[in-house]
Amino acid sequence: MFTPPLALASLSGEADADWARAGAHYAGAAFLGGIAIDDDSRAAARDLVARDRTEFLPDDPLAFIDRQLAALENVPIQPAFNVRSSTPEPIPDAARVCRGRDALLEVNAHCRQAELCAVGCGESLLRDGDRLREYVELAAETGATVGVKVRAEVPGVDLPALAQGLEAAGAAFVHVDAMDSESVVRDVVDATDLFVIANNGVRDAETVREYVDYGADAVSVGRPSDNPDVLARVLGAVEEQDGLEATSSQ
């Protein structure tokens, strides 16, 4: 799906085209966003800003997605956009923007902030599998390459079974924040044919090797994705792993 099999994971209010460009020497993909694309999720994002979190809140989120992806047109990295929505209606519109820019669309079923969960997006989607599958199906029908960012350790959520449903709905990849349950990556790999991106704590050769041993197709770096020292160390580790088809992005 991208090489090297190292991705930059979205950072709310920070992961934009400039951030992706800065990491392009090290990573094969960059997940911009997340960005709220419907009224309720945007209201929740404004509440987050009110308590000093950084969020993308452009007047027109779809136009913002398009501008940011256009800015990466000549950058040697696979672009992707992480989107939040409480309703299905804007999902295919965002997917069409991504398809037009040869970008991946990533549905956010990951963010755990109370404001987002209260309006039915982020992590709350993990407990509403029918609605999450609807999002994926609507996006995949546009011809976009679609995936979902998920989180482990959510009570009552069977991630491998959920991933099977997402695959049936048309997902091509799943981005797994493994939390402290790294072996869940193996469970998802065994349950599906999805491209599996492993996230959480990826910092060095030891953490890369653990996820490779669990069968991940790629790894992603989250919070330190703007730190070139960490990215260089992880890229070096990725390139040394037999389980990943790593090649330089340059």
Image: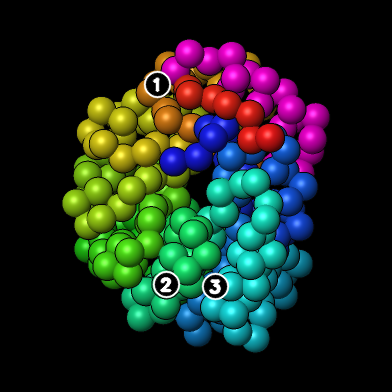
The x and y percentages for residue 205 are 62, 16
What kind of element bears circle 3?
strand
- Residue extent of the magenta highlight: 225-243
Sequence order check, earlier mark of 2 and 3:
3
Q: Is residue 122 visible?
A: no
* The magenta stretch spans residue 228: yes
Q: Earlier in the sequence, mark 3 or mark 1?
A: 3
Q: Residue at x 72, y 23 (%)?
A: 233
Q: Which residue is mark 1?
A: 214
Picture coordinates of residue 136 (x, y %)?
31, 62
Identify the image quadrant of residue 175: top left
- Sequence order check, earlier mark of 2 and 1: 2
- Let me know if residue 2 is in the magenta part: no
Q: List the residue tagged with mark 2.
A: 96
Task: Tell me which residue sits at (59%, 39%) in the image.
Answer: 28
Q: Residues within 10 Å of mark 3 (few under 14, many from 20)?
A: many
